[in-house]
Image (cartoon, helix red, strand yellow):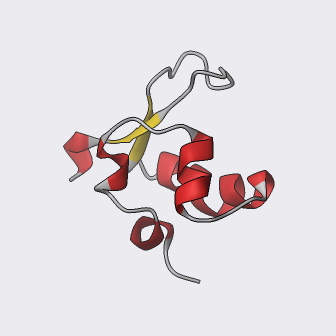
Amino acid sequence: MLAPCTKLSFDFCKNPRSRLEMMNFLQMKHNPTFRVNYLNPLLEKGILIMTLPDKPNSKYQKYVVNASNL
């Protein structure tokens, strides 16, 4: 399996993207697998940041590349 950073293109995430948009980009359908293997590691490393950090479970939550980590 490729590293999450490799598969989830930085160019794709320069614009805020929803979890569903990222899953479609990776052609994934299983939400728990995506969260555990891709989304959570990128958030923990600070590579991706939430657009609504005070509301992590919001249906309007989007994720974007953290410009300060590039």
Q: 33 left or right of 25?
A: right
* Image spot of residue 12 (x, y percent): 35, 53
Q: Is residue 55 above or below residue 20?
A: above
Which sits in the foreground, 9 or 27?
A: 27
* Image spot of residue 10 (x, y percent): 32, 57
Residue furthest to the top? 54
Q: Is residue 55 above or below residue 28?
A: above
Question: Which residue is at 68% across, 58% downward?
Answer: 34
* Image spot of residue 52 (x, y percent): 50, 20
Residue furthest to the bottom? 1
* Image spot of residue 63 (x, y percent): 46, 37
Q: Is residue 27 above or below residue 40?
A: below
Tally of marks: 0
Q: Image quadrant for the N terminus?
A: bottom right
Question: Which residue is at 32% across, 39% downward?
Answer: 15
Question: Which residue is at 37% across, 48% downward?
Answer: 13
Question: Which residue is at 58% across, 60% downward?
Answer: 38
* Quadrant assignment, res 32: bottom right
Q: 70 left or right of 44?
A: left
